[in-house]
Image: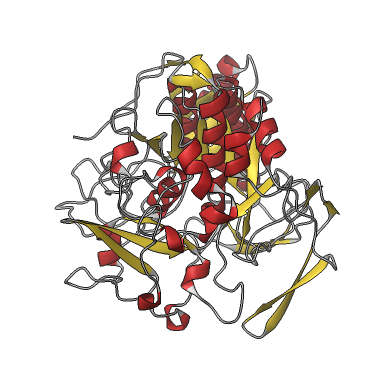
Amino acid sequence: MVAMAACSPGASQAPPRAATPRGPEYLVFYTQGGRQQAQQAVESAGGTTLANDAKLGYLTATGGGGRFAENVGADGSVVGVSPDRSIGFAEAGAARAATRRTGGAKGRSAAFPDARSFTRSGSGEPLAGRQWDMRMIGADRANAKVPGSRQVLVGVIDTGVDGKHPDIAPNFNRELSRNFVTDKPKDEDGETLDGPCEVSSCKDPVDEDDDGHGTHVASTIAAPINGIGIAGVAPGVQIVNIRAGQDSGFFFLKPSLDALTYAGDIGVDVVNMSYYVDPWLFNCTNNKADSRKQQLEQAAIITGMQRALDYARQRGVTLISALGNGSTDLGHPKVDKESPGYPVGEKKERQVDNSCVNVPAESSGVISVAGLGPSGRKAIYSDYGVEQADVSAPGGDALDGTGAKATRSILGAAPEHVLRAAGRIDAKGEPKGADVVKDCKGDTCAYYQYLDGTSMAAPHATGVAAILISRFGKPGRGGLELAPATVEDLLYKTATPKACPTPRQYVYKAYGQDVTQVCEGDQADNGFFGHGVVDAWKAATVEP
């Protein structure tokens, strides 16, 4: 049965939403007190208001004509206008095997070591020996002292979570989990996007992940200690799937707004956001390379997400995000070649500067996490910036050493059907390369994959935050509560400071090329490591 989002008491309908929209839909963000004027602007532009979200201050409207966004955006009550790309549609006879891409950055299997060179761990979970990341932050020791409380709810805003995976199921809260995404088989140009729907409604069940990204993230946070596979940073807390990502890996604005609002409403303690809001890698409100419609869309993303983040944070949700995988100094960005990433084929090269922001990583109130390789260096792919990197954590780096090795990446849970669709396991269920690991307990087998990315770093910080909330939280909505500002302070206090490399112009060697990145700041706070490397053991032992 498909779980639907709970009704939001703060949202009003004006008028009731039509079953079949009369044209493209838009999110129209208005100024405080500007709802009526914004509705009039919609009508004057030939559109119709379908709904009003009073919590975040925006209308959902159908457009009238090709210049609807520009015409509405010209009104003084409107601060941003974005197409609502979140609504999918079903194809006749829809049924499929998943063929999704996995998030993060995998190493090259040709250079991977033989999987037989690894043995099962003599202590901890069977695959603990492969979890260098947990040893780096002391989570292997913290697991025994403070595994985390089941009263702590961790929201995973991602592509979904495989709630039936043996190494996630014991900590998966199915009742509270929601899917705010409707699969979209094809984009506006008729090109394949998510592919055919698995269910007639095109809305996947809350315990499904057809990409694998969200499942990997969830297991890093809270894979239980149950005698199979791995253990997460906080193996005793609960995971709530709050899906906002398409099967294809795109994250559009409306599902992200819905996910954050829902997290705030139900008492989630901390959310992990290992993504950026599509289609703009950098959101600029006045870039000369962009049309007025594109500028309004980027303004809507900046404004709408900040309102949703503020809404959640004011209700006790600590916000943690991946910093990004562009090897970019976010304090001094120069060129964006990735936007707009949707529809496919629309990318262009444009000049950007520090007024352009990556959302949510650079949004206010968000703790952003840089990625580290097993040597402790900042991973080559990780974005950085003295104003942007708040903390750092293991994200994996297959290139952190001689050649490329999968085992320098992060091992996390993987949905079996995703691996089968990608050709990573054979007909007998055996892995085809060292990037995939199988572990069995009796008749129960589970699969895991190695991935790189700040997407993998962020959940380590989220798990540490969950430990802190478990220790210092007080009874409240959803279980325990701890003010996000307090969580942030404790996360920084317990992090291990790490100075910039010497020289600060660090040179990476990658496939015969030199890549130089410059670290700014001091040991207490710098662009590569932020306030330091998160530390689960210190979080489990620090005095109040």
Q: Residue at x 40, y 61 (%)?
A: 102
- Above or below for 421 versus 267: below
Numbered marks: total:
0
Q: Report whether 123 appears left or right of 294.
A: left
Q: Is residue 447 visible?
A: yes
Q: Quadrant of residue 78?
A: top right
Q: Position of residue 65 (x, y in %)?
A: 48, 40
Q: Report whether 88 appears left or right of 405.
A: left
Farthest residue, direction front = 122
Q: Position of residue 478 (x, y in %)?
A: 43, 20
Q: Report whether 420 appears left or right of 157.
A: left
**Which is more toward the observer, 88 or 155?**
155
Q: Position of residue 448 (x, y in %)?
A: 35, 60
- Above or below for 349 versus 524: below
- Above or below for 384 versus 56: below
Q: Report whether 206 appears left or right of 467.
A: left
Which corner quadrant holds the N terminus? top left
**Which is more toward the observer, 504 or 259?**
504
Q: Quadrant of residue 412?
A: bottom left
**Which is more toward the observer, 187 or 207?**
207
Q: Position of residue 435 (x, y in %)?
A: 40, 70
Q: Residue at x 64, y 44 (%)?
A: 368
Q: Residue at x 62, y 59 (%)?
A: 372
Q: How is the image coloured?
A: secondary structure
